[in-house]
Amino acid sequence: MKNKLFVMSAASGAGKTTLKDKVIGEFPDIVYSISATTRKPREGEVDGVHYFFKTKEEFEKLIKEDGLIEWNEVHGNYYGTPKFFVEDMLRQGKRVLFDLDVFGKVNFDKVYPDATGILILPPSEEELERRLRGRGTDSEEVIRLRLENAKKEMEFAKTKGKYEYTIINDDLERAADELRAILKNR
Ligand code: ADP
Ligand code: 5GP
């Protein structure tokens, strides 16, 4: 399983979606695992592409039926990794890239301990706030909650997380090169 599964984590707004979208097309053998969530879709987000958007009841049914590798409540919503997709992709010989919060990653490691962890950091707290605001997708209340959680998440990641790589996403091109190098490293 080594070098088959890659897990990216970051504080919200650090830029992991941007980085992932920039490089994933260059690796035909890597697929992105689409998570299930109870968060409402942002403008432009498509069900089955960005997430599988679920009601709370549907999500709780998935948990009960053991359909998730891991799940967690993040910023007030449920997020989880569907089992069927990963197992199917591994059978097909694909590699899989995940986007998990830092606490979900710990539970993920219990199932797949060899997964490669990649922590994406913003250059500073101020820049993280600028990016969250600049993205223009979240209310002031949601931005506040995400910034508050970012501190706890990064503290946890640095002390208790298992991340083989850390990428500081200051210059996007350089950060993308670092991600490419990790994904190439088989
Ligand atoms: P995440 O998926 O980690 O929550 P996003 O990929 O949505 O974060 O990025 C948050 C915002 O920051 C977006 O508006 C994106 O365009 C911007 N952004 C991402 N990376 C950089 C970068 N290296 N420099 C400047 N802005 C960036
Ligand atoms: P967003 O709402 O910005 O898309 O994502 C919020 C947070 O949820 C991010 O930290 C992201 O990594 C995390 N997340 C997305 N999918 C999953 C998942 O399947 N499991 C867990 N544990 N976290 C996830």
Image: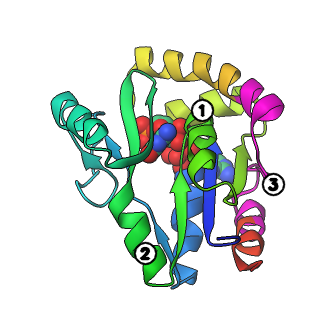
Q: Which residues are magenta?
A: 154-178
Where 68 falls versus 171 (above or below)?
Answer: above
Q: Are marks 2 and 1 in contact (CB under 8 Å)?
A: no
Q: Are marks 3 and 2 in contact (CB under 8 Å)?
A: no
Q: CA distance from mark 3 to mark 2?
A: 23 Å
> What residue sits 70% from the left and 70% below the top?
2
Instruction: Tell which tag, 3 or 2, sits nearer the viewer.
Output: 2
Where is residue 89 shown, x and y percent of the image? 43, 75
Q: Which residue is mark 3?
A: 164
* Mark 2 CB within 8 Å of ligand 2: no
Residue 89 marker: 2
Amino acid type indicated by mark 1: Phe
Where is residue 37 shown, x and y percent of the image? 32, 40
Q: Identify the secondary structure beneath mark 3.
A: loop
- Which mark is first along the chain, 3 or 1? 1
Amino acid type indicated by mark 2: Met
Crowding near the residue tagged with mark 3, few <14, some 14–19, many ≥20 C-alpha atoms within 10 Å:
few
- Give the quadrant of residue 18: bottom right
Q: CA distance from mark 1 to mark 3?
A: 16 Å
* Mark 1 CB within 8 Å of ligand 2: yes
Q: Which residue is mark 1?
A: 103
Q: CA distance from mark 2 to mark 1?
A: 24 Å
Q: Is residue 67 left or right of residue 135?
A: left
